[in-house]
Image (tube, grey):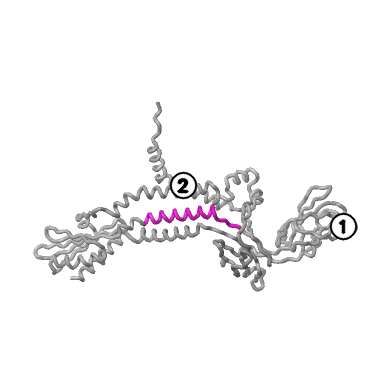
């Protein structure tokens, strides 16, 4: 007959699993290795670029594993959750013993350890042992708190200590890691990082996310009142680009601000950064078809992404996209339209048309030379729109990290002992100190204390 498992045993085993240092090492190594992958493989790029770089097989594998958006994947968040639980359990598991050290019922002092300490200082004094005890005790109590006084065969022994609580510094570091991980998870789950292009004079109320995720609807509108940029002298490189933005909510302007790079507009926890700029064509274009055989010219009005019937029902043209700059066969072109040409008796093909060079399409074999005219251009501002509700938690984590590191590395538990003895009518004093860490610091404390005690009598 099989014995039923004991729930207490299971919980004990589960607790020991999460309290394991080996688990910490495995998780940290896993996070390190996956972070390397996230660095080597660019994140949140266009799927087309990933297809070209990795091919169909690797693309499908990486896409299934969320490698292209690794830091928002379920398994990366799972690792962070396990790490958080591991740190919490390890801290609780060791806190009980640390707590007994910090708050003992009665501190214990071993005089023999102080007598053997290498940092001990010794001197003689003309005052009596009783007088020195009455002089030293008040001075020491101001610096080390409660002083314990014991009577020895030949005099007195004064014990003092401070800084037991500094052992909690490591727990402040643990807490900082927990705060930062939880803040990162909150930002990953409830935040977003999107982008939007807004032409001058227009407004939007939704933003696009990377990696083909659904657009996010905002509860306000962002309007680009004006856009301006300047170039360096004798150069085409932009010196500064500035957007005049308005936040419109309930048909009212609630915020107006000019933003530049690294000076965002912030509203309702959402950050709007100046990211890029470019040119956009007007919604209506004039497409010109010039027949090569006869030289006849046909002009047709068109709009972006709307099919246009070519002359003689020879096919259909769709103006799909516009690029302010485009590289074609190692030649850099400007104001290029990306089009799809669907001929009646042929396969669909993608062609490019340069608005700056009307005869550019002559190189293509075909019955017509296609060009685009009357394309009015206007500038748009490219904005990065982000929201990260976990930032306050991360900032709190950084604060605890600084405090914990300062306490751990620059503060320490100090025990001091002053022994006053009378031998052959002479009063001798011995001062020594003990610390679990930072022995050079403890040595300096004993030297300073000894010099100040000598001046008191």
Left or right, 183 with respect to 226, comes to: left
In the rendering, at what x and y percent does residue 290 appear?
Answer: 85, 59
Residue under label 2: 82
In the rendering, at what x and y percent does residue 6 appear?
Answer: 39, 35
Q: Secondary structure at mark 1?
A: strand
Residue lying furthest right in this view?
294
Residue lying furthest left in this view?
424
Q: For the point 12% across and 67% down, which residue is it?
A: 128
Left or right, 127 with respect to 180, comes to: left
Q: How would you rate the neighbour count of disc 2 (Cα within 10 Å): few for under 14, some for 14-19, many for 20 or more?
A: some
Note whether 233 is above or below 248 in the view shown: below
Give the image quarter of residue 370.
bottom right
In the rendering, at what x and y percent does residue 400 appear?
Answer: 41, 59
Q: For the point 30% across and 57% down, which residue is it?
A: 164
Q: For the point 65% across and 70% down, which residue is it?
A: 229
Residue lying furthest front in this view?
250
Note whether 226 is above or below 117 in the view shown: below
Residue under label 1: 291
Q: How would you rate the neighbour count of disc 1 (Cα within 10 Å): few for under 14, some for 14-19, many for 20 or more?
A: some
Magenta-span inclusion, residue 170: yes
Magenta-span inclusion, residue 252: no
In the rendering, at what x and y percent does residue 331 appear?
Answer: 72, 60
Give the image quarter of residue 423.
bottom left
Q: Main secondary structure of the magenta part?
A: helix
- Pick the quarter of the image with the C terminus: bottom left
Closer mark to the observer between disc 2 and disc 1? 2
Tell me if residue 291 can be seen: yes
User: What segment carries the magenta color?
Assistant: 169-194
Residue lying furthest top in this view?
1
């Amino acid at each position: 007959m099989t014995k039923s498992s004991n729930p207490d045993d299971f919980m004990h085993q589960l607790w020991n699993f999460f309290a394991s240092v080996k688990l910490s090492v495995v998780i940290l190594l896993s996070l390190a290795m996956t972070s390397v992958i996230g660095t080597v493989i660019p994140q949140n790029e266009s799927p087309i670029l990933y297809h070209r770089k990795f091919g169909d097989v690797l693309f499908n594998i990486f896409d299934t594993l969320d490698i292209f958006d690794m830091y928002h994947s379920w398994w990366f968040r799972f690792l962070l959750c396990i790490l958080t639980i591991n740190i919490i359990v390890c801290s609780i598991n060791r806190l009980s013993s640390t707590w007994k050290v910090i708050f003992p019922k009665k501190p214990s002092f071993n005089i023999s350890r102080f007598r053997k300490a290498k940092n001990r200082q010794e001197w003689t004094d003309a005052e009596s042992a009783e007088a020195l005890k009455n002089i030293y005790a008040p001075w020491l109590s101001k610096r080390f708190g409660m002083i314990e006084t014991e009577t020895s065969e030949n005099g007195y022994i004064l014990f003092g200590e401070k800084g037991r609580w500094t052992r909690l510094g490591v727990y402040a570091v643990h807490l900082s890691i927990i705060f930062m991980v939880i803040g990162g998870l909150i930002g990953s789950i409830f935040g977003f990082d999107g982008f939007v292009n807004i032409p001058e004079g227009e407004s939007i109320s939704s933003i696009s996310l990377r990696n083909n995720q659904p657009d996010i609807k905002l509860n306000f509108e962002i309007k680009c009142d004006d856009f301006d940029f300047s170039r360096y002298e004798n150069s085409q490189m932009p010196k500064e680009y500035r957007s005049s933005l308005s936040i419109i909510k309930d048909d009212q302007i609630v915020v107006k601000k000019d933003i530049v790079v690294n000076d965002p507009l912030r509203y309702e926890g959402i950050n709007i950064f100046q990211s890029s700029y470019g040119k956009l064509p007007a919604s209506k274009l004039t497409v010109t078809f010039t027949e090569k055989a006869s030289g006849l010219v046909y002009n047709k009005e068109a709009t972006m992404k709307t099919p246009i019937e070519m002359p003689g029902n020879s096919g259909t043209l769709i103006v799909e996209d516009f690029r302010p700059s485009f590289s074609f066969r190692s030649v850099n072109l400007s104001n290029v339209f990306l089009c799809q040409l669907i001929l009646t008796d042929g396969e669909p093909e993608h062609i490019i048309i340069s608005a700056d060079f009307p005869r550019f399409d002559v190189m293509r074999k075909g019955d017509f030379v296609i060009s685009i005219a009357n394309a009015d251009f206007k500038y748009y501002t490219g904005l990065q729109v982000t929201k990260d509700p976990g930032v306050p938690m991360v900032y709190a984590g950084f604060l605890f990290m600084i405090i914990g590191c300062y306490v751990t590395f620059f503060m320490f538990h100090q025990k001091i002992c002053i022994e006053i003895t009378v031998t052959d009518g002479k009063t001798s004093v011995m001062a020594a100190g003990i610390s679990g860490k930072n022995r050079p610091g403890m040595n300096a404390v004993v030297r300073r204390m000894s010099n100040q005690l000598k001046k008191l009598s």
